[in-house]
Amino acid sequence: MEITVKRTETNKAYTAGSLSVNGKTVAHYTLEYTHCMMPAGIYQITLVSDPTMTCRQIAVVDFDHDPTDSNPRVMATIASGNSYRNVKNTPNVVIGEMLIPGAVVNSRKVFSRLFERIEKCVQRGERIELKVTDLAMVERTVPTFWLIPAK
């Protein structure tokens, strides 16, 4: 399976894009915190258990990750949330549908569908590749309602 995150716009607060699986758009809106995004490139996806929660996460790991490794080095996660602030200071991707620029709705539903597809691929022993691209990314100004006041 090939998952692609195509970044389309960025500003000082967040970077937005879309996520597709095998060429078909699954999440029409993705958000990342601009100051700690994953570099564009090719990675591998796996599922890992979160020790603080009872659920598993979609984890982004090195491209040469060994699938038999039960404790991989997680570089980022694909997660559900409401805005880029859900992943502030961590290199994660929030997926869903755009409510307003910088805010996501229906995130849990989109995340659940993606998680189920990835889980089936993992059970079949398939390799899941993540391609992050920012070739079409445009610089925009941040909407004023997302600016964090200086202290």
Image (cartoon, rainbow, N blue to C red):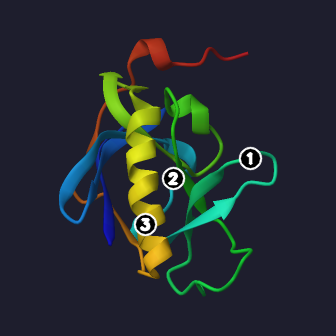
Q: Position of residue 12 (x, y in %)?
A: 46, 34
Q: Indicate the amino acid at tag 2.
A: Met
- Pointer 2 local density, CA inside 10 Å: few below 14, some 14–19, many at least 20: some
Q: Are marks 1 and 3 in contact (CB under 8 Å)?
A: no
Q: Which of pointers 2 and 1 lies earlier in the amino acid sequence?
A: 2
Residue that carries the numbered disc 1 in the rendered image: 54
Q: Quadrant of the image for the N terminus?
A: bottom left
How many marks can you see?
3
Give the left or right position of residue 54, taking residue 63 as reference. Answer: right
Q: Position of residue 50 (x, y in %)?
A: 73, 54
- Toward the right, the furthest residue is 52
Q: Position of residue 25 (x, y in %)?
A: 21, 50
Q: Indicate the amino acid at tag 3.
A: Lys
Q: Which of pointers 3 and 2 lies earlier in the amino acid sequence?
A: 2
Mark 2 and mark 1: Cα distance apart in space:
26 Å
Identify the residue at image location x=43%, y=66%. 120
Q: Is residue 12 visible in the rendered structure shown here? A: no
Q: Indicate the amino acid at tag 1.
A: Thr
Residue that carries the numbered disc 2 in the rendered image: 37
Q: Is label 3 in a helix, a strand or a loop?
A: helix
Residue that carries the numbered disc 3 in the rendered image: 120
Note whether 100 is above or below 19 in the view shown.
above
Give the left or right position of residue 58, taking residue 3 as reference. Answer: right
- Pointer 1 local density, CA inside 10 Å: few below 14, some 14–19, many at least 20: few
Identify the residue at image location x=56%, y=54%. 77
Q: Is label 2 in a helix, a strand or a loop?
A: loop
Mark 3 and mark 2: Cα distance apart in space:
27 Å
Foreground of the two, 34 or 29: 29
Q: Is residue 149 visible in the rendered structure shown here? A: yes
